[in-house]
Image (spheres, rainbow, N blue to C red):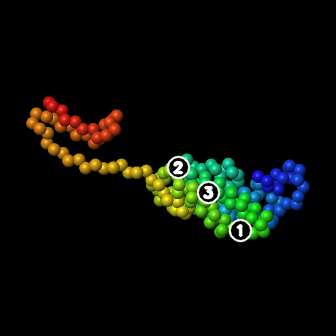
Amino acid sequence: MPTDDNLKIRGLALPSICNLCRSTEESSAHLFFNCSFAKLIWNWLSTQLGYPIDHASTKSLLSISASWSPQLQQVLISTIVNSIAVIWHCRNKSRFDNLNINSAQAIQMIKLNTSFTGNFTKLCAKPSLLEFSILRAFQVTAKYNKAPTISEVNWAMPLMGWVKINTDGAAKGSPGHARGNFQG
């Protein structure tokens, strides 16, 4: 990214200050992980998850627990990517358009973008209250695996000389209901 530190490495001489916090020189590490604006975003995300997240680097942010469902994992990755994109957007708006976007507005942008991704996934969530709450915080509708269908079966007495064997339809290799009448 063309942050001030990367532009200086390429030989461009320029004064540098973070456009979001105005407290130090701009670098990728500062802008996305150490800036007070970025910290507000990462602390908000920690609050949504209910535990502190390590926001020291992109790698640490993307180390999402495998215990989360596929849908929630995708939503969290989307949230992290959208957070980085929104921080960059806010920086550019401040630098080039002299427009300051506050953290509440930035969070709404993140939630909107994440909601779009999360609601169009085909992945499923786990039926847990915690996952439901996290998905709801990002305005994502949880998708669950469909419950098995229950079929009513009426038993009838076999004909004289026949033996009737009833099964529950779970016969190995049988795609449909397993039934059979056998003559004895």
Q: Within 10 angstroms of label 3, few (less than 14), some, or many (20 or more) residues?
A: many
Q: Amino acid at mark 3?
A: Thr
The residue drawn where x is 78% and y is 68% is 98
Using the numbered discs, state the Cα–Cα distance from disc 3 to disc 2 in whole angstroms: 14 Å
Q: Considering the numbered disc 1 on the image, is that residue within a helix, a strand or a loop?
A: loop
Q: Considering the numbered disc 3 on the image, is that residue within a helix, a strand or a loop?
A: helix
Picture layout, residue 47 above or below residue 81: below
How far across and down, in percent of the image, does residue 137 sit? 55, 63
Q: Amino acid at mark 2?
A: Pro
- Residue 177 can be seen in this image: yes
The residue drawn where x is 30% and y is 50% is 150
Callouts 1 and 3 close, C-beta under 8 Å: no
- 97 vs 111, nearest the viewer: 97
Read off the residue under disc 1.
Answer: 101
Q: Amino acid at mark 1?
A: Ile
**Left-right relation of 161 to 80:** left
Read off the residue under disc 3.
Answer: 79
How far across and down, in percent of the image, does residue 99 sit? 75, 69
Read off the residue under disc 2.
Answer: 70
The residue drawn where x is 72% and y is 57% is 33
The numbered mark, 1 or 3, whose residue comes first in the sequence reads 3
Q: Nearer the viewer, mark 1 or mark 2?
A: 1
- 116 vs 184, nearest the viewer: 116
Q: Considering the numbered disc 2 on the image, is that residue within a helix, a strand or a loop?
A: helix
- Quarter of the image with the C terminus is top left
Callouts 1 and 2 close, C-beta under 8 Å: no
